[in-house]
Amino acid sequence: MHFFGYKGKSFYAEGVPVSRIVKECGTPVYIYSSKTLKRHYKAYGAAFSKVAHLICYSIKANSNIAVLKTFAGQGSGFDIVSGGELFRALKAGADTKKIVFSGVGKREDEIEYALKKGILMFNVESSEELASVNRIAGRLRKKAGIAIRVNPDVDPKTHPYISTGLKNSKFGIETKAAIKEYINAKNNLKNVNPMGVDCHIGSQITKIEPFIDALAKTKELLRTLRSEGIEIKYLDMGGGLGITYDTEAPPHPSRYGEAVIEGTKGLGVTLIFEPGRSIVGNAGILATKVLYTKKGSEKNFIIVDAAMNDLARPSLYGSYHAIKAVRENSGGEITADVVGPICESGDFLAKDRILPDVRSGDYLAVMSAGAYGFSMSSNYNTRPRAAEVMVAGKEFHVIRKRESLSDLIRGERPVSTKKRRRK
């Protein structure tokens, strides 16, 4: 459930009309609901309240510091995939003992940074990475907590770009190889502590069965490791629970929790979860202004000031985002593509969509834009990135100013063509 909807003919974010926000902040603008963020986070806490658990919000979904601070205030840990995300988490007041570091390509400076900050553990994804963590920890005279991300070869039945648990995926290590790496870490790598098992199979998963299939395989691995004298304290189930963009009907965290708790009975581990999209996805919208409309013999177009550089998901994945009029009108409906100003045919937010017959100067709200929206945005076509706003009740706050033209060239330096004079 989220707190966006109509009151009369006006579309609201909690107690604030979106028309007021766009009037004061301009467009495009991302708008987040604080109440929705907290509700969704608490749903996970309630789902696993009966067992030892740690919720580590996945920063890549939405990395704004105000969003992170909201979760930190609820007691959340964080799943990071870069040194930059660690920096953001720390700025938001994160507890370093509640941070797990995932990702296939951790640089040495990022590993060192995380070790110095004392994070809980690294989710290791290759033999060479494990060796690097051990070497760097030794140099720093520290002991690195590690889990190995195990690839269980489970099909999550989601978009192939966000499936991460199959044998042909770049993520994780196959089970047999992972067992060898754990044994090697225990016997030969003195600067790492094998303390967890990590299993993340994908994103936007709308059924429980793939999670349970992966859990069954992971349980067998855990028993094998314990028989080798490797004491596993944490089982990281990853994230991946989907949301409703269109007609999807993903399970509520409570149903997911029931299934996982039943499947992990007697294991004696602390469960770690890395939700991202399922917490922030429906907690945000992207508001955009209609610039022009264009009617052709075969296609109608609504041209708006938001584009694929602001919200990449439709162009990248062919993803569906519902679109609402910020102010309802009685002008009928039209079937049209909603497109942006980018010079690419792939620049669209919706195709062949039945929408209100809007006019130039009207505003639209692109729904379910809280996850992988701003965090995947870019300056393509030298476009300033959007502003971000957080709504709390009847108030709203700008949590990221819109980029200026000067921001676009910050850090750039022209090369001088003048020849130096010889002395």
Image (cartoon, helix red, strand yellow):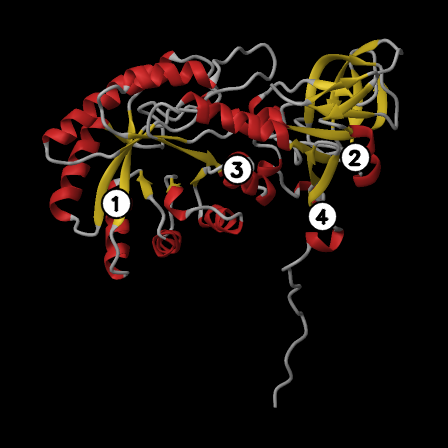
Q: Is residue 67 left or right of residue 212?
A: right
Q: Which residue is mark 3?
A: 71
Element marked by disc 3: helix
Q: Which residue is mark 4?
A: 403
Can you say which quadrant of the picture contains the C terminus?
A: bottom right
Element marked by disc 2: helix
Q: Residues within 10 Å of mark 4 (few under 14, many from 20)?
A: some
Alpha carbon separation for disc pair 3 and 2:
24 Å
Q: Given contact means CB atoms under 8 Å apart, are the residues at marks 2 and 1 in contact? A: no
Image mark for residue 21 = 2
Alpha carbon separation for disc pair 3 and 4:
25 Å
Q: Amino acid at mark 4?
A: Glu
Q: Earlier in the sequence, mark 3 or mark 2?
A: 2
Residue placed furthest toward the front: 50
Element marked by disc 4: loop
Q: Amino acid at mark 3?
A: Phe
Can you say which quadrant of the picture contains the N terminus?
A: top right
